Every structure is written in structure tokens, then in C-alpha cells.
Image (tube, rainbow, N blue to C red):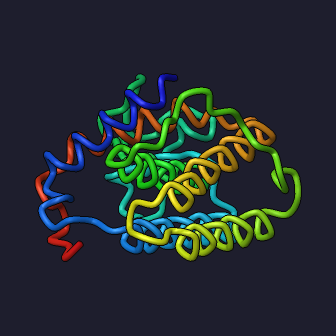
């Protein structure tokens, strides 16, 4: 993947969707990442798959699409199923969302994203230790920022992406395809979806 190009593509979509109507700060990005990491932990705690889609007409808010379980759809015949929610969910998707937030922000800086590689520090240990370490790294990026777009703080954000790539590699997660799928889904969302303040 050409990370510099992809980050610009992600950023342009965020601009088009109104996410930059108010200038975003590193603190905004860190808070977004903390939300996604919390969601990843919740999905992990609940034993949800790494990636899944919900079944829309099942009547159950959390019913996982049978196709994600390797089964056949009991509601519709064939693949793709018209009842399958296009939004990907799961532990790996929340980690991908964190990476998307970082890429969006880094697209506004001078940080070069070429030649990124998976950094596998703590990637094979307990998931909770990995998430906690990522949170510590986010806080370290905030402490090291100096001014809002300082190289040292933003360079730490690049390292965070490499850490998440390392976790994905160790855990057989195709993070690049998940990033692309979630980005495509994000492109389909309405302007300022959810009426968020930030």
C-alpha cells in the first residue's frame, strides 16, 4: 500500500464529509483513537469475531451475519446477501478505525509515511497489554507534541500505525483490506453523520 497516497485519500474523504469544518487537533485525534481502542476491547471482551457484519432483518441488534461464520444465510439465498449490513464491525475494524484517524491527521503534516513496516512489540502478548501500551504511546505522542504539528509527536503517531500493523501481522489479520473496506464504507456515509460536534 502507498501509505502517503492512502492517507491523502482518507483525509480528503473526511474533509468532504465535514469532519474538518472545525480544525482538528492532535487531542481530537487521540480522543477518537481512545474511543476506537475502547470499542476494540469491548468487542474482544464479548468474544466477537475480528471482523464481521450484522444481519439487518434478524430482529436482533447484535446478530452476526451467518456468512461471516462460514454458514449459509438462513434468510436470503446467495452471496452477497441483501440483508448484510455493509458496515464492517469487530476488534480488527476498531483498530483499523484508529489507524484511519491517525492517517487522516498525518495527511495534514509533513510526516512521511513511505516504507512503513509492522513493528511487533508486544503484538503476541495479551490483547489488553497491547491496547494499554498503545494508549500509553498515544499519551506519549501528546506529551511530545510541543506545538500542534511537531515532528516528534506526529512521528510517534506513525510509529503507532506500525505497532497496529505489527499486531495485525502476528494475529493473521489483513489490516490493509480492512482499512480499504472501512474507508469505502466511510465514503458512503452522509455529511457530518451523527451530528457530532467534532
Q: Quadrant of the C terminus?
A: bottom left
Horizontal side of residue 197 vs 138, given as left or right: left
Q: Position of residue 150 (x, y in %)?
A: 46, 60
Q: Is residue 78 above or below residue 56?
A: above
Q: Which residue does the image show at 32% across and 40% down from the upper left?
A: 10
Q: Residue 79, located in which quarter of the rendered image?
A: top left
How many labels were placed on the picture?
0
Up/down of 138 relative to 74, above or below: below
Q: Quadrant of residue 172?
A: top right
Q: Is residue 143 above or below residue 193?
A: below
Q: Nearer the viewer, residue 68 or 171?
A: 171
Q: Nearer the viewer, residue 127 or 197?
A: 197
Rendered image quadrant of residue 80? top left
Q: Position of residue 57 (x, y in %)?
A: 32, 52
Q: Residue at x 53, y 62 (%)?
A: 153
- Residue 7 image point, x, y percent: 39, 37
Residue depicted at x 80% and y 69%: 129
View extreme (right): residue? 125
Q: In the rendered view, would you say 102 is above or below 177?
A: below
Asked whether, in this view, residue 42 is left or right of residue 30, the answer is right
Give the residue drawn at x 37%, y 53%: 105
Q: Position of residue 127 (x, y in %)?
A: 77, 63
Amino acid at each position: 500500500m502507498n501509505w502517503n497516497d492512502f492517507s491523502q485519500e482518507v483525509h480528503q474523504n473526511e474533509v468532504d464529509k465535514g469532519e474538518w469544518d472545525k480544525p482538528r487537533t492532535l487531542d481530537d485525534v487521540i480522543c477518537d483513537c481512545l474511543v476506537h481502542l475502547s470499542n476494540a476491547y469491548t468487542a474482544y471482551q464479548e468474544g466477537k469475531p475480528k471482523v464481521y457484519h450484522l444481519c439487518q432483518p434478524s430482529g436482533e441488534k447484535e446478530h452476526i451475519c451467518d456468512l461471516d461464520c462460514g454458514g449459509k444465510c438462513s434468510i436470503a439465498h446467495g452471496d452477497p446477501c441483501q440483508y448484510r449490513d455493509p458496515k464492517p464491525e469487530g476488534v480488527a475494524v476498531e483498530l483499523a478505525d484508529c489507524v484511519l484517524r491517525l492517517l487522516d491527521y498525518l495527511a495534514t503534516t509533513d510526516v512521511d509515511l513511505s516504507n512503513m513496516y509492522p513493528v511487533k512489540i508486544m503484538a503476541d502478548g495479551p490483547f489488553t497489554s497491547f491496547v494499554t501500551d498503545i494508549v500509553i504511546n498515544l499519551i506519549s505522542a501528546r506529551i511530545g507534541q510541543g506545538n500542534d504539528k511537531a515532528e516528534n509527536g506526529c512521528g510517534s503517531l506513525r510509529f503507532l500505525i506500525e505497532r497496529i500493523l505489527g499486531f495485525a501481522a502476528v494475529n493473521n489479520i489483513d489490516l490493509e483490506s480492512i482499512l480499504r473496506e472501512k474507508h469505502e464504507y466511510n465514503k458512503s456515509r452522509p455529511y457530518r453523520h451523527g451530528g457530532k460536534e467534532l
